[in-house]
Structures are given as structure tokens and as C-alpha cells.
Image (cartoon, grey):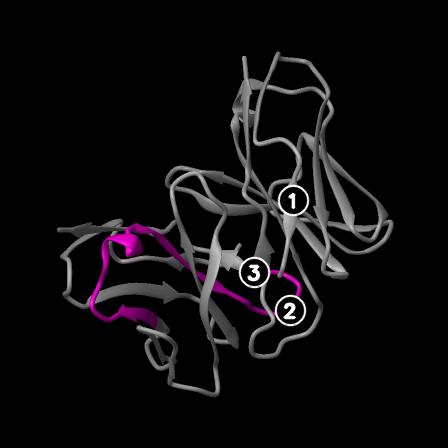
């Protein structure tokens, strides 16, 4: 069974703290993604990685960075958390290429509150 | 980014009725579309997908229709059940096959 695991479901952090959100997938997928989800705005892509140590900015990368040292693990880093980064963060993975049934698999989400 | 929109933010249906959730997309070059279901407090789950060379695809109780002429996608759920209550997203894959763009979602409420 496909599995994307986000280690922290609920976090509360203070403004200015450095925050790490960890994601692990067990499907040997090349692609991994970080999205944030806000009411009325849907899912917005922060960063994605198409291979180890490779990354590409998504639509809203400001204030975030990522790390992909191993194929199965993709970390999202908030260098200095701010209140406008309070959101739900979704990690996802997929294999490259398009064919029926090839899709993005999501984790359960990490709810981050910055106070 | 690409515009993937939904006509209705909330849809209420009676249990046992059929549901139709709509989605408009803006990029005529998009060739792959997915519907996701997201239950409260959970991550999105894949429901069904369709390629642009198809007009219709059926799954278990779900059917996706694609109208490329008007750039419209719909998800039909037959005999809607309480467990179908969730937010439904369509996703569009234009240009770069590594990226998907999602709409804001339609909330489906199933009344007993």
C-alpha cells in the first residue's frame, strides 16, 4: 500500500522559530512535493523535488526552504516562522511521467500554528 | 499559476441521490486531470483520473466527464452515501508533468 508519512500532525511554534516538517515515502518515488492548504485558496505548491538533492520552487516558496538528502525523505524548513505561515502543510510523492493511475499520493497533513 | 476553478463551493444532496461536482480549467494544453476527495482532518485521496484523449471514465460509483471544448470537468457520484461527505478537488496537469494545480474544492454535504 502507498504510504506518505508526515511525522508531525499538530505543531505550535513561536514567531521567529526555525521549524522542520518531515515527510517520508515508502514507494521509491522520484518526485516529492510540499503544498500548503488554506481555506478558499486550495492547495498551493511550495517546493518540489524530482531527485535527491534536486529541488525546484513552486508558486509560493518565499519563507521556506527544503532538503532532500535521501530519496525517501523530503523536509520543509521554515527558517523564521511567522504568523502568516499558520496553515496545513501537505507532503506528496509521485513517480515521473504520465500514465493512467500515476498520480500524486498525499500524506495526512501537518497542522502548524505560529503564535 | 493556472486557474482551476469550481462552480460551487458547497453542494448539498440527499442520501441516495446522484451528485455532480463541476470544475473549470483554463489551459487547453492540459492533458491529464485528477479528482481527489479530502475528508475532514485528512490528506487528499485519489478518486479517479482522465486523460485528454478520453471524454468519460468510470470507476466504482464515480464517473468523470471531460469536455475539452468548454474546458470543463465533472465528477458524478451515483447513489451518494453519507461517507461521501467531503471536499472534492480537481487537479490539472499543464505543461510540466511534474506539477499539478488544484482548485479550491467543493464541499459535498450528504443529508440523511
Front-most of residues A50 and B68: A50
Quarter in which the C terminus of chain A is drawn: top right
Against A29, is B76 above or below? below
Q: Position of residue A32 (x, y in %)?
A: 70, 53
Q: Residue at x 53, y 24 (%)?
A: A84
**Vertical placement of residue B88 versus A110, above or below:** below
Residue placed under numbered mark 3 in the picture: B100
Q: Nearer the viewer, mark 3 or mark 1?
A: 1
Q: Which residue is mark 1?
A: A5
Residue A53 covered by magenta stretch:
no
The CA distance from mark 2 to mark 1 is 23 Å
User: Disc 3 versus disc 1: distance between alpha carbons?
Assistant: 20 Å
Q: Position of residue A50 (x, y in %)?
A: 77, 58
Q: In the image, what residue occupies the spot 66% across and 64% down?
A: B98
- A20 and A85: which one is in front? A20
Circles 3 and 1, Cβ within 8 Å, touching? The answer is no
Compared across the picture, whether B5 is left or right of A95 comes to left
Give above or below for A38 relative to B15: above
The Cα atoms of the two marked residues, 3 and 2, are separated by: 8 Å
Say which element carries label 2.
loop
The residue that disc 2 covers is: B97
At x 26% / y 58%, what residue is drawn? B7
Name the chain under label 2.
B
Assess whether residue B75 is covered by the magenta stretch.
yes
Dividing the picture into quarters, in which one does residue B20 lie? bottom left
Q: Magenta part of the protein: which range? A: B73-100
- Going 22% across and 63% down the picture, which residue do you hit? B80
Image spot of residue A38 (x, y percent): 45, 37
> Label for residue B23?
none
Q: Are marks 3 and 2 on the same chain?
A: yes
Amino acid at each position: 500500500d502507498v504510504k506518505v508519512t508526515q511525522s508531525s500532525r499538530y505543531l505550535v511554534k513561536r514567531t521567529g522559530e526555525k521549524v522542520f516538517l518531515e515527510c517520508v515515502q515508502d514507494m521509491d518515488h522520484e518526485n516529492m512535493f510540499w503544498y500548503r492548504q488554506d481555506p478558499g485558496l486550495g492547495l498551493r505548491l511550495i517546493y518540489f523535488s524530482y531527485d535527491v538533492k534536486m529541488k525546484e520552487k513552486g508558486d509560493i516558496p518565499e519563507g521556506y526552504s527544503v532538503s532532500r538528502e535521501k530519496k525517501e525523505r523530503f523536509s520543509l524548513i521554515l527558517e523564521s516562522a511567522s504568523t502568516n505561515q499558520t496553515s496545513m502543510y501537505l507532503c506528496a510523492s509521485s513517480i515521473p511521467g504520465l500514465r493512467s493511475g500515476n498520480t500524486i499520493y498525499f500524506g495526512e497533513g501537518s497542522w502548524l500554528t505560529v503564535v | 499559476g493556472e486557474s482551476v476553478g469550481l462552480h460551487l463551493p458547497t453542494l448539498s444532496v440527499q442520501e441516495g441521490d446522484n451528485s455532480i461536482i463541476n470544475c473549470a480549467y483554463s489551459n487547453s494544453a492540459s492533458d491529464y486531470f485528477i479528482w481527489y476527495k479530502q475528508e475532514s482532518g485528512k490528506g487528499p485521496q485519489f478518486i479517479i483520473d482522465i486523460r485528454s484523449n478520453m471524454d468519460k471514465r468510470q470507476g466504482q460509483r464515480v464517473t468523470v466527464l471531460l469536455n475539452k471544448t468548454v474546458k470543463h470537468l465533472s465528477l458524478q457520484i451515483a447513489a451518494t452515501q453519507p461517507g461521501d461527505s467531503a471536499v472534492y478537488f480537481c487537479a490539472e496537469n499543464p505543461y510540466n508533468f511534474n506539477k499539478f494545480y488544484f482548485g479550491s474544492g467543493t464541499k459535498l454535504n450528504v443529508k440523511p
